[in-house]
Amino acid sequence: ETERAVAAGLYQHAAAELDRRIAELIAAGRNLDLFGLRIGLAAREWALLRRLRLALSELRRAGRRLAREGGTPFFSVESHFCDVLSDGGFDIVLGNPPWVRAERLPARVRETLSERYALWRPAPGPFAHFPDLAVAFCERALELAATRGVIALVVPAKLATAGYAESLRRHLAQRCTTAVVAPLDETAATTFGAAVYPMALVVARAEPEAGARTETRLGPADSTHQVAQRVLQAEGPWVLEPDAATVARRLEHDFPPLARQWTPQLGVKTGADSIFLVADPLPGTRPVARGRDVARWEVMPRRHLLWTHDASGRPLAELPEATAARLAPFADQLQRRTDYHGGPVWQVFRIALAVVPHRVLWVDLAREILAVVPPPEIVPLNTVYGIATRSGADAHALAALLNTRWCTALGRITADPARGGFRRFNARVVGRLPLPHASAEQWAALAELGRRREAADTLVGELYGLDARDQRALLRLAPNPR
């Protein structure tokens, strides 16, 4: 009976809060501007109002069901374990929380999570994403643990590198004793039936000691598989390869990140590949580069794109007859695309890399960084990243740099892992790579190697100042010969 009363009180409190927010939105829409006209609500505010009203309706239905049927409608740790929490919390919290991408969660759930959990926040940047659901479970586990209590969870390995987990990493490294952060191998991923690599995370809810060290492998303590916890307190991804981490930190200190001079960006997004891509060239099409079409130094297009923009990137005012005939039956579907916000329905999105004369492209998902300077007619799709440069020489020099084993190794340190030894070499990862200081002659030599499609490992190793020990540490992450 007490639990039901608590539940009823929670429902009433939540309903009152929803009523308040709905009233605030309606009042804001009824306000008058300087000309005495109603301001009204923007499209985003209308969408929020509809979600709030739907949530209130569902909440009231749940309240009526509670009054009619009785019984506790949900599990509450505070209710079922009030004696444990009144003593400070659990000594140990074990779990394998669900790994669910935020895009798969209903909008109301994402909104609730962002309000409830301080560490569940989107990463900054133009391609920001809300965190995986596992981030909220990590924060909840810490809430339930007593002071000096331990949480031990199996979480996605990408929490060590993803931008959206930055707040969680900072909290764990600076305010807790992070005993184990151990990405598991592909055998473990298969055992768990996971689509991404798992990671063992063991954290004590206690301030870290000055010399605290973090194990990066499961098993007996081994200094060769440890990093100082203070290293994890720096911004950015956690670097869990001790020897390579030393090299990466030095290079990060000595050289600026590549993104300081060039901006990595995604390729074109159609929002409807099945409509825009065709097997054979037609009037008004351009060959496309998808991740599967790009190798080191070369691109092999297998599909063509119905190109609906002019040379400057503006949508065409009128389509070629064949293109118009192909797209006409899909007008409604094209309007429903997430990125469509008005204008010609045949437009595609993020087209900057498709309309510049000089660019270098690389594959998003691969075991190594695979870079190429493509012909000008190629359109990169959004499984490919790229950089627009001012000259062909810069593009070829960047391709030569990115195709070195050193860049693959440094990229693999911070890239999100995937099955089969693959990594996601996204804009964040490549943008963090160190850009070596090079004279005009050295940069020209790098560009010439790129034009001839020859390995630049020796030259780039010299520019980075890599000694034999540095090279051995990096080659353990990128052992494949060029």
Image (cartoon, rainbow, N blue to C red):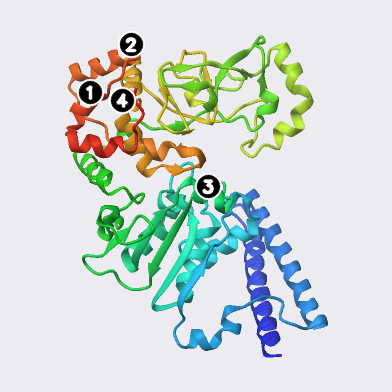
Q: Position of residue 6 (x, y in %)?
A: 65, 85
Which residue type does callout 4 highlight? Leu
Q: Is residue 146 visible in the rendered structure shown here?
A: yes
Q: Which residue is mark 2?
A: 452
Q: Nearer the viewer, mark 3 or mark 4?
A: 3
Residue, disc 4: 401
> Quick one: which residue is furthest to the top in this view?
283
472 over 389 or under it: above or below: below
Q: Nearer the viewer, mark 4 or mark 1?
A: 1
Front one among 445 and 30: 445
Which comes sooner in the sequence, label 3 or label 4? Answer: 3
- Whole-number angstrom distance, CA of label 4 to CA of label 2: 13 Å
Bin the neighbour count of mark 2 within 10 Å (Cα to Cα): few under 14, some 14-19, many 20 and up.
few
Q: Earlier in the sequence, mark 1 or mark 2?
A: 2
Q: Position of residue 365 (x, y in %)?
A: 49, 34
Which disc number belongs to residue 458? 1
Disc with the residue nearer the chain's start (4 vs 1): 4
The image quarter containing residue 169 is bottom left
Looking at the rendered structure, the kind of residue marked 2 is Arg
Considering only vertical position in the picture, is 72 above or below 291?
Answer: below
The amino acid type, in three-letter code, at marker 3 is: Val
Left or right for 298, reference 132: left
Query: Which is nearer the N-term, disc 3 or disc 1?
Result: 3
Are circles 4 and 1 on residues that touch, CB within 8 Å?
A: no
Going from N to C along the chain, the mark reached first, 3 or 2, is 3
Query: Label 4, label 1: how many angstroms apart (C-alpha)?
Result: 11 Å
The residue that mark 3 highlights is 196
Alpha-carbon span between mark 3 and mark 2: 37 Å
Q: Residue at x 83, y 81 (%)?
A: 68
Residue mark closest to the camera, 3 vs 2: 3
- Residue 118 on image: x %, y %: 46, 65
Considering the numbered disc 1 on the image, is that residue within a helix, a strand or a loop? Answer: helix
